[in-house]
Amino acid sequence: MIYIDNAATSHPKPESVYKRMDFVLRNASANPGRSGHRMAIEANRVIFESRESVARLFNIRHPERIIFTCNATAALNLALKGLLQPGDHCVTSDMEHNSMVRPLKFLSQQGVNVHRVQASREGSLDPDEISSAITCETRLIAVTHASNVIGTITPIADIIKTAHNKEVPVLIDAAQTAGSVPIDVEALDVDMLACPGHKGLFGPQGTGFLYLSPKINLNPTVFGGTGSRSDLDRMPDFLPDRYEAGTLNTPGIAGLGAGAEFISSEGIDIVRAHEKHMLSRLTGGLSGIPGVKIYGTKDLERRAAVVSFIIEGLDPAVIGDRLDTDFGIGVRVGIHCAPDAHKVIGSYPKGTVRMSPGYFTTSEDIDRAIWAVEAIASGRENHHYIPVSSPRPAFPRG
Amino acid sequence: MDEQYKIFVFKSTYLTFKAERALKGAHVACKVVTKPRDISSDCGLAIRVTALDEPAASKVMCDSGIASLGVW
C-alpha cells in the first residue's frame, strides 16, 4: 500500500530499527536495572545508549533528564499532573490534541484554571496573545509545536522567550515535529518537551519520552519499583528513576534509540527538506483539483508535513474508504482527536482527510495520491495510473 | 570484600553506565556488577575495577565529571 499516515505513526521504519529491536528482543531483553546478570546488564546498556542517542538528536545536555514513557500522551500527563496544583493557572491553546486537552480538563475539575488562547483560522498562535494571558498565578504554558490537523508550526522560540521573561515554564508537545523538525533543546531553553517515539523518531509504538530541564521538578505520577534505592518506600529523588517506575519497554526503547541515530546520521535538516518537498508537491497537486479545499497555511516554512483537505460534497470517511479500497492509499480521516482545532479551521464536526508524508514517502507516492483524489473528486472509476515521476529510491533506507 | 578489587558506587544506574562508558573509552578495564550487600542494601549496580586500576579509574571519573558515592 501507499502509506501517507505518518502523523499517526511512521511507516516503514529504517532497517536499523527492525534489526536493533530483533537483536535486543532475542539477546538483551532481560529486566534493565534489576538483576545483575549479563543479559540484564546488557538490557541496561541498551536503555543507556538509547537515552544518549535521543539526547544527541535534540542537543540535550543532561540525558538523565529524559524520562522514557509509553507515548507522548503519557509524557504530557506526567508533565501536567506532576506540575499543576489546584489554584494554579495554565495557558494553552485551542489547537491542542486531546492528549493535552483531556488531562487539562481533568485538572480544571480539580481546581486548576485553564486559559485557552485562540489561534487564527490558519492555526497560528500569537506569542503576544499568550504573553497577555499570563497572570501572577500562571504556573505553565502548554502548547503544541505543530497542529496534528493542519501542521501549522507554533513559534515556540518566541513563546519560550516571552514566557521566561515572566518566569513561567513552557511545555512543548512535539508529537508532530520530533524527528521531523529540528529542535535544539539547549538553544531554545526548553523546559519540558513531550515526544512520541513512534512517529517522526521512527521507534515502535509504545515508546515516547518527556524531557525535563534542570529547572523543573515534578511530582511523580506513577509509583513503584525502579531497581534503585529499593530500601525506600518512596520514589528516589534522582532522575530518570524518579519518574520511571516499573519495567521499561527495552526492545521498544532500543528501536527508538536506533530511530534517533538514523535521523542524526541522515541529518534532521535533510529529513525536514524531504518532507517539505513532499508537502509542496502534495499541496500543489491537490490545490489544482476542482472541489478540493485545503486547510492551513500556504507558507510551508511554517508547516509540518500534514495536509488536511476535503472534497466538497463528499464525506471524508467515504474519501478515506475509497482511497484505501480502490487505490491502496492509507490516510486518516475525521477529527484526529483534536475537535477544537477543527472548530478553529471550520471543519467541525465532519472533519477532514489528512495526508501526512514521511521521510520514506516518494514523489511517486504523492503523485498517485493526487491522481486518486482527482479521480474521486471527478467521480471517475478508472484506476489506471500512469507514473510520471522519478523512480523509487532503495527502500527502506537505513 | 575481595581486596584485589575496588567497587565504585553511584547514585543512579544511569551514572553507573555513564562511568562504564568513560572507563572503556579511557581503556580502563571494568565490569558492571551487582552492588555487594555489605556496601548497600540497595539492589542496584556498581562498577568493579582492579585495585591496581583504582587511581586511573578515579581520575577518569573526575575528568568526566561523574560523581561516585564512594569507593569500597
Image: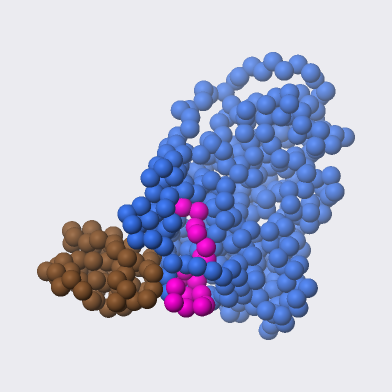
Chain colours: A blue, B brown
Foreground residue, A93 or A49?
A49
Placement of B25 over or under A65, stated as above or below: above
Residue B63 drawn at (x, y percent): 24, 71
Q: Tell me where residue A34 sits by quadrant.
A: bottom left
Q: Quadrant of the N terminus of chain A?
A: top right
Left or right position of A379 against A143: right
Q: Is residue A45 visible?
A: no
- For the point 59% across and 68% down, the residue is A222
- Magenta stretch holds residue A291: no
Q: Residue at x 69, y 42 (%)?
A: A307
Q: Is residue A243 magenta?
A: yes
Classify residue A317 as left or right of residue A80.
right
Position of residue A371 in the picture relative to residue A19 (left or right): right
Which residue does the image show at 57% across and 23% down from the upper left? A389
* Percent of width and height locating residue B34: 32, 65
Q: Position of residue A60 (x, y in %)?
A: 44, 63
Number of marks in the image? 0
Residue B70 occupies which quadrant of the picture? Answer: bottom left
Rendered residue at 50%/71% (across/down): A242
Which residue range is magenta in the image? A230-250
- Look at the picture and state if A369 lies above or below A206: above
Q: Nearer the viewer, residue A45 or A274?
A: A45
Q: Is residue A118 above or below residue A364?
A: below
Residue found at the very far right of the displayed protein: A313
Q: Quadrant of the C terminus of chain A?
A: top left
Residue A313 spot, x, y in % from top left: 88, 35
Can the viewer see residue B29?
Answer: yes
- Which is the main secondary structure of the residues drawn in magenta? loop
Residue at the extreme bottom of the image, as rendered: A136
